[in-house]
Amino acid sequence: MTGTSQQDLPPAVLPQGSGRRQPLKGQTALVTGANSGIGEAVAIALGAAGADVVVNYVVGDDTAAKVVEAIEAHGQKAMAIKADVSKEDQVQAMFARMIEAFGTIDILVNNAGLQRDAPMHEMTLDQWNLVINVNLTGQFLCAREAIREFMRRGVRPDVSCSAGKIVSMSSVHEVIPWAGHVNYAASKGGVMLMTKSMAQELAPQRIRVNSVCPGAIRTPINRDAWETPEAYDALMNLIPYKRIGEPDDIARAVVWLASDDADYANGISLFIDGGMTLYPGFTEGG
Ligand code: NAD
């Protein structure tokens, strides 16, 4: 184990005061998978909080353009960049374009993700690989590029007391096993320990890495679980708070984690799930 002496640490800078209307003013952010669902809400909320935002997407030029417009309506710069997060060359080209256009990156939200569900005995290697490649390897590739830029640039005390922030979009399934979704649960379990290991490794550089773990959020990824009244009622058995989550519930948590208000939060899994992780089956006494 190598030690880090006090002298190696960057100078301590106090967090920017809380309660500011635009806690991310002057910062630049990249959100992956930002033209749908949670990523879209996060990108717009980061813009409302004062950040300039890159809207990453893989298909849907028109929906990405609409998210860019919504961010610009908050008076911030925004640009859409098409890139598949599971492809190293595309990720590197995306970061190069962002840094050329915006100068640097302060916040990465590793949000892109998908499901390819199948019972274990029928799951194909392609279904396994696609989910792991996008949900886990995609987060690795984007985090590595962001970290390289955070380390090159260091802390700018007038912008943030941290050298950079990464928010990993995980899931309640980083801890709740999920039959029929083994590839997805394995990817989010991986995201959990990747996030915490990065947080431990990079804390001495004043880089913070945390994850947000949504429960059931109303987006296209899980339409089957909320679209009909029957499905919605069945879903409520899993949610003590008795409502589905909305993308903005997640976006507010991401803005907080990315801001200096969360300066002492590092390596946490922030569950935003209406209590889904509280063993709802025991609500009636077990
Ligand atoms: P969504 O399908 O609306 O959005 C997913 C986004 O990821 C889309 O924009 C999609 O195009 C993008 N994407 C997929 N593959 C990509 C690739 N290779 N490169 C770049 N982008 C790619 O779903 P969502 O619910 O908004 O999901 C966002 C994240 O939240 C995912 O990581 C998902 O696992 C996680 N999550 C969602 C829920 C939920 O209930 N909706 C719960 C827990 C976790």
Image (cartoon, rainbow, N blue to C red):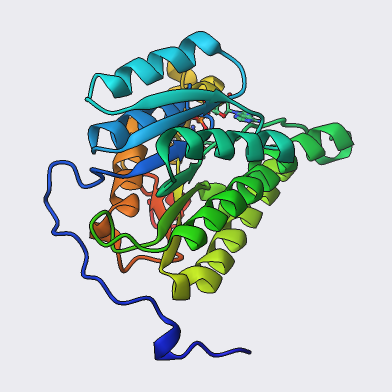
Q: Quadrant of residue 121?
A: top right
The residue closer to the viewer here, 29 or 36, is 29
Ligand 1, image quadrant it occupies: top right
The quadrant where residue 184 appears: top right
Residue 111 x, y percent position in the rendering: 52, 39
Where does residue 218 sit, x and y in percent of width and height?
A: 42, 26
* Image: 238 above or below 97: below
Q: Looking at this view, is 192 or 224 the one in front?
A: 192
- Is any part of residue 176 visible from this angle? no
- Along the viewing direction, whichever of 283 and 113 lies nearer the viewer: 113
**Apparent side of residue 143 relative to residue 72 in the rendered image (left or right):** right
Q: Position of residue 69 (x, y in %)?
A: 34, 15
Q: Residue at x 18, y 41 (%)?
A: 22
The residue furthest top is 62
Q: Quadrant of the N terminus?
A: bottom right
Residue visible at 52% across and 73% down in the picture: 200
Q: Quadrant of the C terminus?
A: bottom left
Horizontal and vertical percent position of residue 178 = 64, 45
Q: Is residue 260 above or below residue 94?
A: below
Residue 160 placement, left or right of 10: left
